[in-house]
Amino acid sequence: MASRNLSASDPSQLSVDHLMESSEDSVAPLINMNRAWTTGNIPSPAPNPSVLQRERSVDTLMEEIDGDVALPVASVVQLHATGVNIDYSSPWTVSKQDTWTGSGFCISKKRILTNAHCAQNATVLQVQRQDHPKKWKAKATTISQDLDLALIQVEDDEFWNGAVIADLAPSSLPVELYSEVNAIGFPTGGSTLCVTKGVISRFDAHTYVHSQLEGIEDGTRNAPGPIFILQVDSAINPGNSGGPAVDRRGRVVGVASSGQTFSQNIGYVIPISIVHLFLDEVSNLGKWTGVSEFGIWFQNLESDTYRSFLGMADYTTGVLVIDVAPTGPLHDKIRPGDVLTHIDGLEISNQGKVPVTISSQSVFVDVDAIVTCKPKGDKTSLTVLRRDELENGDKDKTRKRKLRSIQISEALTPLSPCVPRFHGFDASPDYVILGGLVFSRLTMPLYKCFNPWYALSDCVDKFKEAASKEVVALVKILRHEINIGYELNDEMLESVNGIKITSLKQLASMVRVFEKKVGGNRHQISQGEEKGMGDDGFIQICFRTKEKKQEPKLPDMVLERSCIARSHKEICESHAISHTISPCLLQEENNIAD
């Protein structure tokens, strides 16, 4: 079974290559050392000589360190997985089956900790201990796409007989820059356990590469914010993902996650504080709900002139708030035009950075990282400067107004994005077919199928206006005589028969009514369903447009209502589609009806 690295021919690699073209000021691009993919007879890449010099064989893994501490190699397991990806552009289909391997390690409560990208979409998952040839059946119980972490359960007690539990360092353990770290796992190039030795070379914060590949558009309001990460010079190769990174005392200080393909010995490790953040919430809530989010979009204030215009003192630094999430806890407390100067007592620079002390050094990270690392319920204190309101009768709106300092304390939470981010978490491949027009809610997995999807890119870079509001988009047109003459316009659905569409479920309800109404026969239609049907025999469809149109607005597409049921039957038969409405939406409709 051969292994392959992600290459430019992979859709996910193309996404990362796009990230590599970002500005020099951005965090260095990451290549997802996803999992050791295995298909066909593609040869493994040649081993890096510098890496081989650092690797140690299984015979020497249990050598003592500092006289009494050994590496926890017996706790590390290899994952064997087979799975398929959903094709969001044709949501009634799946992509080809793939097989891959990864690493993980045993922790308390009979759990295995690994990366999300090692366990997601697996239809068959097995684990193998390094000291036993047997493979045990397993299943992923919790997956965090934003943290790239997952928990796996093995129910067979035989697996746990003799299994060694890794010792997790406490979440309060300070990060020691330049201290020794060992990455343990099952990388490509062999079938046995391998250890690579290095040091922690950098402490940073950014959006994890797996999250960017799966559903976060970095640099937009869609992104929850950067998360702490460690850079190590231990080689982290495909297959290493999910294995532990341990210190000289044998304690797990992080989870190997990703590396850079085009650089020598640059790997990335999820720090133990983030690991405990994940494990503690799963223990308390039974699930992971996402990282807490700032919900504030701001502008840097590097311009001395702009700060003077705002009335800021020369010694005052901060950032200018330009947007606040309507559904976030700070919506009624912070306003556009406020200047954010401090978070938890830390001074915010004019570039939106805050100092964090690591090994007696000040490291500047994005202000959002102070929020994303917090457990749910922990409050965040903020200091903002706000200009005084104009007094009644004061007509001189150009008069310089004084800034007053305001203290705010609030527990920040995960936010529901305008475009759902992750498959299986807040996104699902639901669809509705109306006269061959395939509609779906806009999600990041769907967006990335057409990336760049310019017509709907603005939806990604905005906060969600209301909890129940969805963006419904036209994905494709299944050709049939009912839709001759219409072209795919990549736009957002605005209304059907004059009724504004705010969710895919609402559209599904209307389509079910259209399918009942055959040949003008209304006896199957209830009085409530009659609303919005229209009396002219047509279904009028309007899309959102950025261009100014005539008033009253004419529909962009018109379908003959009496032909809907017949066209749906013929379209489903010709394209081997079981339903014109995805089964999940049908189930929801039936549950409501019951």
Image (cartoon, helix red, strand yellow):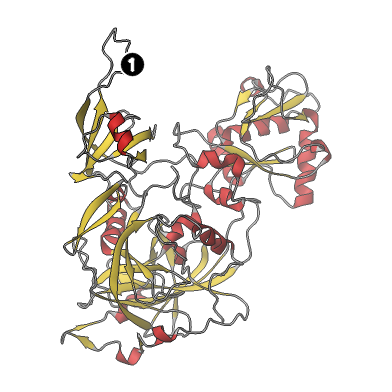
Residue wearing tag 1: 397
In the image, 272 versus 499, the foreground residue is 272
| Secondary element at tag 1 | loop
Quadrant occupied by the N terminus: bottom right
Amino acid type at circle 1 is Lys
Residue 407 is drawn in which quadrant?
top left
Q: Give the class, few, some or many, for how many residues have Cα within 10 Å of label 1's Cα (few <14, many ≥20).
A: few
Q: Position of residue 302 (x, y in %)?
A: 32, 42
Q: Which residue lies at the image location 60% right of the left edge and 75% below the top edge?
A: 39
Q: Position of residue 217 (x, y in %)?
A: 48, 49
Q: Position of residue 404 (x, y in %)?
A: 20, 27
**Residue placed furthest toward the top:** 393
Q: Is residue 506 above or below residue 461?
A: above
In the image, 484 versus 352, the foreground residue is 352
Q: Which residue lies at the image location 22% right of the left edge and 41% below the top edge?
A: 342
Q: Which residue lies at the image location 18% right of the left edge and 65% below the top edge?
A: 359
Is residue 205 visible in this depiction of the protein? yes
Residue 390 is drawn in which quadrant?
top left
Q: Is residue 19 above or below residue 376?
A: below
In the image, 287 versus 393, the foreground residue is 393
In the image, 172 versus 362, the foreground residue is 362
**Residue placed furthest toward the bottom:** 59
Q: Position of residue 287 (x, y in %)?
A: 36, 52
Residue 574 relative to residue 72: left or right? right
